[in-house]
């Protein structure tokens, strides 16, 4: 009997294309049962079927921009799940051939329950937020995952072997179980935290355009959250679990004397602190994560490497995990807001106008689109829209005005002169 899948939610697809993780989760929860059943028709095993679907949804996230219609996404999911299941079944067949060369009788496979949708989503969320690794580490993780799949197969088809006649298969069993044990130990340390942060019951603290917020966290630490930023905290956040995910930028004043270190997780790196004051920036659309320490010390972890950053120090981490000291100009732009200053250093108007919208909620219209490439440098107090507009006018050779209710920028060479009122 063919497997029937629920229709793709167009709104969830639109959110997926915008890079909203919640949309991916909705799609996964809608499709999990049917796609796992579909994979099981090839694999005959609930656990392997679930692993297959998990990997497909991680791939879906990476290739989300190509999914333009619900039909395209549905076709991609079904085709990719089927192909992945066939490939996995082919690897299992190779293992089965090794079984046939042994000397013993295969025991009946025991029934294993399929992972719940919550458990499966936790694995996907962990994969999405894992710190990027270098090529060698990535290859090692892939090898570990392959051994894990082999161990799953072994659990279903294992039989006793005479220790006096070791075979290639028994060696594979030993290597697989050792690798699986190492993988479980390693994954437990960080995956539980990542899964808790990604869980549907996590607490989200968010700001909008032109908004700053000061919050006290459950462990006694405080966070000053900047414009268009988000903190995602696990439900169990407190003295024992003190990790959160940052999307945007914030300043943290970390409460000392706790059992667990305070951790801020970003796509590029993890920032670990005990009692200290530091700022971090990690907007989703930006490739670089920037950290600056005011008091105490933090440790930045990327690509399985650690670097201590003392008070007064700063560090930039790119998307490949490479760590370096940022320039003064980079720091001013990235974290000047923490000092109440908005800074732009030689950026185009195309880049600058969205920044003004983020920090001041100013929706400025540029009449002459050829000016988008004009370079601008400016500096203004974060709490003064008037100062920001004046600085933009001076730094960009522009004139600000209104056309009805629309805020308009015009080049100084064509803008009408402002009338000076006589006293």
Image (tube, rainbow, N blue to C red):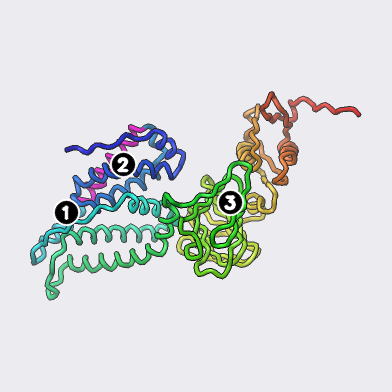
Q: Which residue is mark 2?
A: 31
Residues at marks 1 and 2, CA–CA distance in whole angstroms: 27 Å
| Left or right, 139 with reference to 324 | left
Residues at marks 3 and 1, CA–CA distance in whole angstroms: 50 Å
Check if residue 299 falls in the magenta segment: no
* Quarter of the figure with the C terminus: top right
x then y, percent, for residue 329: 66, 52
Q: Which residue is mark 3?
A: 249
Check if residue 75 falls in the magenta segment: yes
Compared with 221, 356 (above or below) is: above
| Left or right, 53 with reference to 309 | left
- Mark 2 vs 3: CB contact within 8 A: no
* Quarter of the figure with the N terminus: top left
Nearer to us in this view, 204 or 384: 204
What segment is highlighted magenta in the picture? Answer: 70-89
| Left or right, 164 with reference to 402 | left
Residue 93 is labelled as 1
């Amino acid at each position: 009997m063919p497997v029937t899948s629920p229709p793709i939610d167009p709104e969830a697809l639109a959110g997926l294309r915008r890079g909203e993780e919640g949309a991916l989760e909705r799609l996964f929860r809608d499709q999990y049962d049917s796609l796992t059943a579909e994979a099981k028709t090839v694999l005959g095993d609930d656990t392997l079927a679930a692993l297959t679907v998990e990997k497909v949804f991680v791939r879906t996230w990476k290739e989300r921009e190509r999914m333009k219609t619900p039909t395209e996404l549905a076709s991609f999911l079904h085709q990719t799940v089927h192909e992945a299941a066939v490939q996995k079944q082919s690897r299992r067949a190779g293992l089965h051939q090794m079984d046939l060369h042994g000397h013993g009788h295969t025991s009946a496979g025991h029934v294993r329950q399929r992972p719940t949708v919550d458990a499966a989503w936790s694995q996907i969320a962990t994969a999405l937020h894992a710190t990027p690794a270098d090529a060698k580490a990535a290859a090692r993780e892939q090898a570990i995952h392959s051994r894990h799949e082999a161990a799953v197969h072994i659990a279903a088809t294992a039989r006793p072997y005479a220790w006096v006649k070791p075979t290639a298969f028994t060696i594979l069993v030993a290597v697989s179980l050792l690798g699986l044990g190492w993988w479980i130990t390693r994954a437990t340390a960080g995956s539980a935290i990542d899964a808790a942060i990604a869980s549907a019951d996590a607490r989200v603290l968010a700001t909008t355009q032109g908004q700053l917020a000061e919050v006290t966290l459950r462990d006694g630490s405080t966070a000053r959250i900047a414009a268009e930023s988000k903190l995602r905290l696990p439900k169990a956040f407190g003295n024992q679990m003190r990790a959160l995910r940052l999307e945007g930028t914030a300043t943290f004043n970390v409460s000392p004397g706790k059992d667990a270190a305070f951790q801020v997780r970003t796509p590029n790196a993890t920032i670990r602190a005990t009692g200290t004051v530091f700022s971090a920036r990690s907007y989703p659309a930006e490739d670089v994560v920037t950290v600056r320490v005011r008091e105490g010390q933090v440790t930045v972890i990327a690509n399985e490497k650690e670097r201590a950053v003392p008070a007064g120090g700063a560090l930039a981490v790119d998307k490949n995990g490479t760590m370096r000291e940022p320039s003064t100009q980079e720091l001013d732009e990235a974290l000047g807001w923490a000092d109440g200053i908005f800074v732009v250093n030689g950026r185009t108007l195309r880049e600058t106008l969205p920044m003004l919208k983020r920090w001041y909620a100013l929706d400025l219209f540029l009449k002459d689109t050829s000016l988008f490439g004009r370079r601008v440098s400016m500096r203004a107090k974060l709490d003064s829209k008037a100062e920001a507009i004046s600085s933009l006018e001076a730094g960009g050779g522009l004139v600000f005005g209104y056309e009805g209710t629309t805020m308009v920028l015009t080049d100084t060479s064509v803008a009408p002169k402002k009338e000076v009122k006589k006293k």
